[in-house]
Image (cartoon, grey):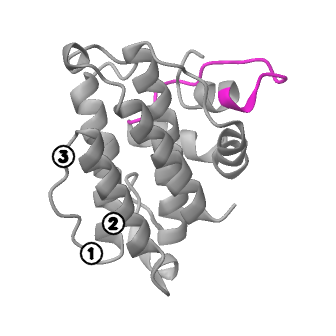
Amino acid sequence: MDPTVLFERAASGAVQVAGQVRSDQWHAVTPCSEWDVTALVAHMVAGTGYLMAAVGGDPGPLGVDASSYRAAIDTCVAAIRRPGALELRCLSPAGFEWSVAEAVAGTAMDQLVHTWDLAVAIGADETLDPELAETCVALFVPQMPTLGRAAGFVGPEVPVPSEASAQHRLLGAMGRHP
């Protein structure tokens, strides 16, 4: 799957769940023990800022409300669709160099996994897009979760049955209890 399409679909699903956060849920706990809902959504929105910086763009202000998040996604997608943008190089959050295309796909995976975290925190539907989950498993498991663990931002792998859904295999690889 084209990395831009992967990111746009994952981020669009994320903003839909973010739009469901009620005013009394912004300080709710999430599966990411160091973040409440506000911090989690801020991290998710910051993914657009990371990609904008990777292509030399200015993300502008990054609010955590759904409309600001949607605007940040739209600005980011337009920037990464510019000719040559995906071929640029940047640093990953784990500190290694990769192409912007890889960064876009990696940020899509981050958006997808954190969409589940957010859904769990607010009691929303936890079902992820199966095609996106399968694509992320194929692209990133097991190497990316292993690199994330070494960098200190992915928890220990949670074993799931080999016949588990792509969503459960992805979540388990990323340290979640599906």
| x, y percent for residue 108 | 51, 50
Stretch in magenta? 153-167
In this picture, residue 110 sits left or right of residue 134 = left
First of labels 2, 3 by sequence position: 3
Q: Nearer the viewer, residue 75 or 145?
A: 75
Circle nearer the viewer, 3 or 1: 3
Q: CA distance from mark 3 to mark 1?
A: 17 Å
- Residue type indicated by callout 2: Thr
Placement of 31 over or under 44, stated as above or below: above
Would you say the magenta stretch is mainly helix, strand or loop?
Answer: loop
| Residue 171, image quadrant | top right
* Mark 3 lies on residue: 63
- Residue type indicated by callout 3: Gly
| x, y percent for residue 25 | 25, 16
- Say whether residue 35 is visible: no
* Mark 2 lies on residue: 75
